[in-house]
Amino acid sequence: MSINSAMLAGVSGLVANSSALAAISDNIANVNTIGYKRNVVNFTDVVTAQSARGRYSAGGVQGVPTAYVSQQGLLQSSSSSTDMGIAGDGFFVVSEGVTGTRADSRLFTRAGSFQVDADGYLRNTGGLYLQGWPVDANGDVNSNPSDLTLLKPVNVKNVGATVRASTTAQITANLNSQQALSPDLGTYNAATNSMSAYDPVAGTGVRPDFTIQMNMIDSKGGPHTVAVSFLKTAVANEWNAEIYSVPTTDVTSGTGLAAGQIAAGKVTFTQDGALDTNPLKTTLWTDPTSPTITLGASNAAAPGAGATNWATGLGINGQTLAFQLGATSDGGGLTQLAKSSTVTTVSTNGAGVGQIVGVEVSEDGFISATFDNGEVRQLAKVAIATFPNPDGLRSLSGNAYGSSIQAGSFSLKSPGEGGAGNVSGSALEASTVDLSSEFSGLITTQRAYSASSKIILTADQMMQELLDIKR
């Protein structure tokens, strides 16, 4: 009968508004939860079949929970370099464990409050491990938009020390064009009486007019000193030049070179004081337009004529050092002008042994380790998972989501590509809860609940009156 349907409609109102109250409670409780998306219970009416003409049977109301997962929260600055936020669509891929087995299911989250745990893994406040594409030794990333198995937990501590051998040396210096000829010039011989053998105490070798020294880092991170010495000749704009190791025992020189020598020859300048790159005039390097020196590995065969290896006892790899001596936009390089011989700058790249001191996250999703020797090494690239309907994802504990039929198939993308959002380092996405709206909802929900209870009370009174007719 209609009175019963009215009572049941009131009960449905109580149930629906109770669900709405539960959603509002969740929202208010998570107002400060990173990456939280507000939930709302929307109402839809329930209509029953009207079987008897002239009578109405109440259907009531039904609550339909809706999660606004796709809503973007405000990105707020964070003091932690491992915190991350997504500006745009997509989710971080996370796992419940680090073993990479099927038991460690892949989940999705916007909560980027990642911290380094005791084992060096990036883990958020929900206890979930961040997944990323590992960067190999060549700096390449093997990614697939639909293969979750290529993702690995990101570890920023189990990274060995870093070393970078020197490959370039930039020199800005001047040789005095008015340099007086040395009295030792007549006895100079690069092979038998060289500048590399100069020892004022022992009285050996020829004293150079000018010497430039630089540091060179080997494949193990060890430092070495390399000197470039010059001795002016009687020919205008021409200098004898030698490149050698200090001490000379660091290298093994081949036939035609004095002990410790790496290269010997002439350096010539043009009449305006610039380095002459004509290989017939500047012979210190095989190609003066691209001056380099090469040192063979310690375990290489004995060096041939004019070649040099690192000393056997060092046990290091061979390497090539390229000199940057040409004039720059500010007039630098190696010059010969009428002013005193001086070195302005000597800069070589390379870095000795370094330990990790920090972690950085770039906008394109690369997680890099910084070392105390100034080196930066990319460790992994964050994958962003996108869904056709993110609002259809299953909500899980830990502020995470699971895939579902309603959400559609996921696609893994690099940050900022194919509709995926960019990653913001040292930032966190705030909750999308608006307290003013939630408190307003509390009031209207309370009133609606009270009204539904009045329906039940009124229907009960009418039912009682019906029963009283018998009396």
Image (cartoon, grey):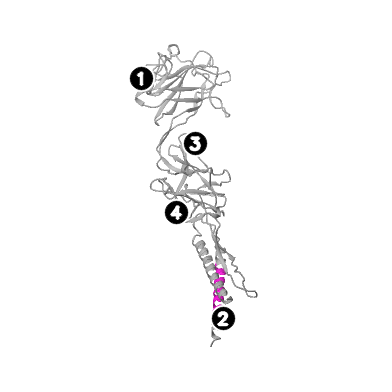
Q: Which residue is mark 2?
A: 462
Q: Mark 3 or mark 2, which is nearer to you? A: 2
Q: Which residue is mark 4?
A: 126
Tally the marks: 4
Q: CA distance from mark 3 to mark 4?
A: 30 Å
Q: Secondary structure at mark 2?
A: helix
Closer to the camera in the image, 429 or 255: 429
**Magenta stretch containing residue 66, yes or no?**
no
Residue 270 placed where, x, y %?
A: 57, 18
Q: Which residue is mark 3?
A: 140
Q: Quadrant of the N terminus?
A: bottom right
Relative placement, left or right, of 272 versus 127 is right
Q: Which residue reaches farthest top?
A: 186
Q: CA distance from mark 3 to mark 2?
A: 77 Å
Task: Point out the stretch of residues depicted in magenta.
Answer: 442-461
- Asked if residue 73 shows in the view, the reply is no
Q: Which residue is mark 1?
A: 201
